[in-house]
Image (cartoon, grey):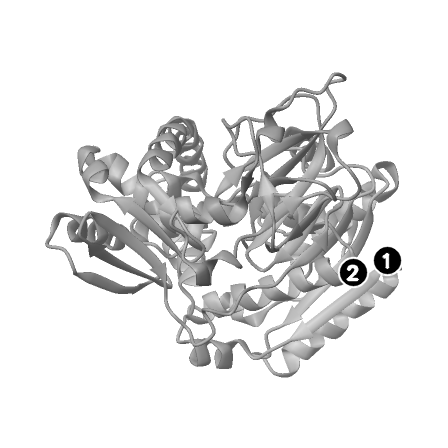
Amino acid sequence: MINKFIKTIRDHNLIEENDKILVGFSGGKDSSALLHLLMTLSKSYKIQIAIGHFNHKVRGDEANRDEEFCRQVGKDYSIDFFSDSYNMDNYAKENKISKEEAGRILRKKFFNRILREEGYNKIALAHNMDDQAETILMRIIRGTGLDGLKGIDYKSGPIIRPILDISKSEIEEYINKEKISYVEDSTNKENTYNRNKIRNLLIPEIENNYNPNFKEALINLSNLAVEDSEFLDSYTASTYKGLSNREKDSTIISLDDFKKESLPIKRRLIRRVFLLENGNINNLSFKNVEDINNLSQGPTGKAIENVNGLRIRTSYNDLIFEKNKKNNDNEPNLLYTNLNKGINIINDNLSLSIEDSIEISQSLSEITIPKDLITGSLVLRNRKEGDKLRPLGLNGTKKLKDIFIDKKIPRDKRDNYYILSDEERIYWVLGLVKSEDTRMKSSKDQYIKIKINSMED
């Protein structure tokens, strides 16, 4: 299994020398196998490993037992151990969301906090091939488009999944062979949660009575979907750029241009808005997408409330997706942070990856800067009085204030735009405009590449 593990890491560029990796560790078979495999490679890859354990406080003494087990594993491996706790059920009630979603949010906040505070740059999660098949089937049952069939990514922002190509049976064989200790979560056998029902009841029923290779068939379906989806992603991204205007808390789509597109592309455009606004489309159903498309065909002034935290409404020739309003929506998100190579965690929804490059980037979500152009440190900050930059396509500089006016950005939204700059010049107003400096060619073909990542678990 170690060879398959290393192949996955190399094929998807998951780990590099000197990485500091926080392992999401429950103490179960999957995460115990993942931790053991990473520790096996730690010396040859020169990586630092730590354990991150979140106690959901829903299994009483058993949950506390698991936490102490994980703490002891950290001592046994002589690595750092980080933990936190919060009652998942209470959080779900407080925020009127499902228990599964509450658990994901709490774990995400915990992991991201450790990355920010302790300097780790990657989070390793123990999703395996069986989890992949279950995820694809869950999305089919809920109703999904082609994107949903792609399944779980090997890499998303700082998150890596190095055992995604390894099956549950292979993990159990490895656990037994290496005599690795682990703890059992009794709730895995309970059929309260949807995933448990699919894992314990539905998939075994299909395998026993219809197709013994059902999980492999789901994985094959996913692989085919990836190929088709990559082409459609490229077309949709180009189309989206031409008909949308994205602000800090909303996305505005031109209805005239939207209506000209075919139905499949309309659906993909809607899903793209949710992906950009929320960082994921995990809970967006086919019905949600169809309801929004129907809204776009109807009279102006209508709205759909609270679809995955967004309000969707029509206003004359605009289809508007906006965040549900809170009391502090107009308070600026003040920021000034130095950026370093690797993953830079900005907040729970945004990270920037910075690495060396030998070519100029053409991507919408990243820029490249000639190394010899940079003065001092790169920083991410809010605007300040007198800010100027050289927008793409212009020879001279322009005041940032005038750019906001030209793009009709309301005054109360302008402080929410993040600016990437050094000591002398602005290179990028994220989500709004790039500088002509990001198209300059380096005489030595040496660039710094900065890429926007969504923070998703």
Above/below status of 202 relative to 59: above
Amino acid of disc 1: Tyr
- Identify the residue position indicated by label 1 in the image: 77
Q: Nearer the viewer, residue 397 or 90?
A: 397
> SS class of the residue under badge 2?
helix
* Between marks 2 and 1 in the image, the one whose residue lies nearer the viewer: 2
- Per the rendering, the mark at residue 159 is none
Figure quadrant of the N terminus: top right
Quarter of the image for residue 97 reads: bottom left
Counting residues from the N terminus, which is met first, the one under dot 2 or under dot 1?
A: 1
In the current view of this chain or complex, which residue is farthest to the left?
299
Q: Residues within 10 Å of mark 1 (few under 14, many from 20)?
A: some
> SS class of the residue under badge 1?
helix
The residue drawn where x is 66% and y is 61% is: 111
Residue 138 in view in this figure: yes
Residue 210 in view in this figure: no
Q: Is residue 43 left or right of 429 when viewed as pictured?
A: right
Q: Nearer the viewer, residue 230 or 323?
A: 323
Quarter of the image for residue 434 reads: top right
Amino acid of disc 2: Glu
Q: Position of residue 384 (x, y in %)?
A: 61, 55
Q: Residues within 10 Å of mark 2 (few under 14, many from 20)?
A: few
- Identify the residue position indicated by label 2 in the image: 118
Figure quadrant of the C terminus: bottom right
Q: Position of residue 343 (x, y in %)?
A: 69, 46
Q: Position of residue 271 (x, y in %)?
A: 34, 46
